[in-house]
Image (cartoon, rainbow, N blue to C red):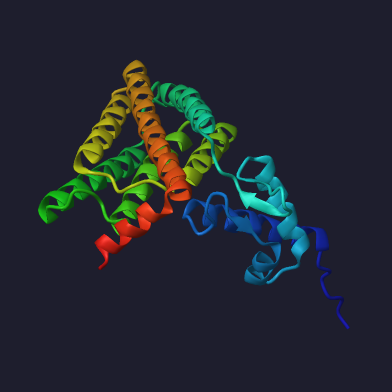
Amino acid sequence: MPNRPKTNRRTRGGSIRAKAYVHIQRQIADGTLEAGGGISELVLAKELKSSRAPIREAMHQLAAEGLLEQNPWGGMIVAQLKREDIVELYELREALEVFAVGKIARAPIRVGDKSRLQQLVDEIAKLQRELEKGKRPALDARQMERFIECDLGFHALLMSMANNSRLQKVVNDTRLLISVFAIHREGHDRASLKSIQRYHQKILDAVSRQQPAIAMVALAEHIQTSRQERLGEYDRWKRESSLRRTVPVFFDVHKMALHP
């Protein structure tokens, strides 16, 4: 009988761990796993049809990267960012992304990269027009998903052009950590979309013209503006959370008024 190829258990376990790592990341990024919420090894093992060992290893890796943290009552929970965490993460984003865009803008941009970046900029302009046409104050949930894809796509493609895999991983991990809080984000209004679209266009134009100083200043301002918006959202969320704990009847009455 021909010999059957042997399955390397270590390789198979590593593959499952990698799959679990990405699976948990995605659930955190899309809000399925909420900040402060528990995460179950058993549930994940059933979802991925695996043993609990590689799930546990993936969770420990995510904990080391700051996405998960130990629950005082046992197990792990999704990290719940504090205000100072948001400040530090944006400072890291600014330092790394501004450095990267300066490097990128010193070399000619490929036609395909420029075309794709322009499409992502134009998609945000399209969302602006949809708001104007629908006469609504802010993006709905589905439109917000489209916006996030465009925004993340623009920055991710830009960073990939720096040809530095370590830098790209740190930036991606930092943006993912910020997204742990971003599930509290409200839909953008026309003014916010216009500001973001202008910054993206200015950055793209500077990179295309090989103007590193202009690209670096524009990206720094863009990140600083985003940081102030996230901090404002965080402060509002904290105030509301505190009110829900101390004056729950206010929210019950408000809910009844909206839904009689």
Q: Nearer the viewer, residue 80 or 190?
A: 80
Residue 161 is at least partly visible in this image: yes
Q: Is residue 7 above or below residue 64?
A: below
Residue at 33% across, 47% down: 186
Q: Is residue 79 left or right of residue 189?
A: right
Q: Which percent across, then down, holds residue 173?
A: 55, 40
Which image quarter is the N terminus in? Answer: bottom right
Q: Nearer the viewer, residue 70 or 199?
A: 70
Residue at 30% across, 63% down: 256
**Quarter of image, res 98:** top left
Which image quarter is the C terminus in? Answer: bottom left
Q: Is residue 22 left or right of residue 120?
A: right
Q: Is residue 77 left or right of residue 132?
A: right
Residue at 71% across, 47% down: 72
**Quarter of image, res 19:** bottom right
Q: Which percent across, then down, holds residue 39?
A: 63, 58
Residue at 39% across, 55% down: 249
Residue extending furthest toward the bottom = 1
Residue 157 is at least partly visible in this image: no
Q: Which percent across, then down, holds residue 214?
A: 31, 18
Q: Nearer the viewer, residue 57 or 11?
A: 57
Q: Which percent across, then down, holds residue 171?
A: 52, 35
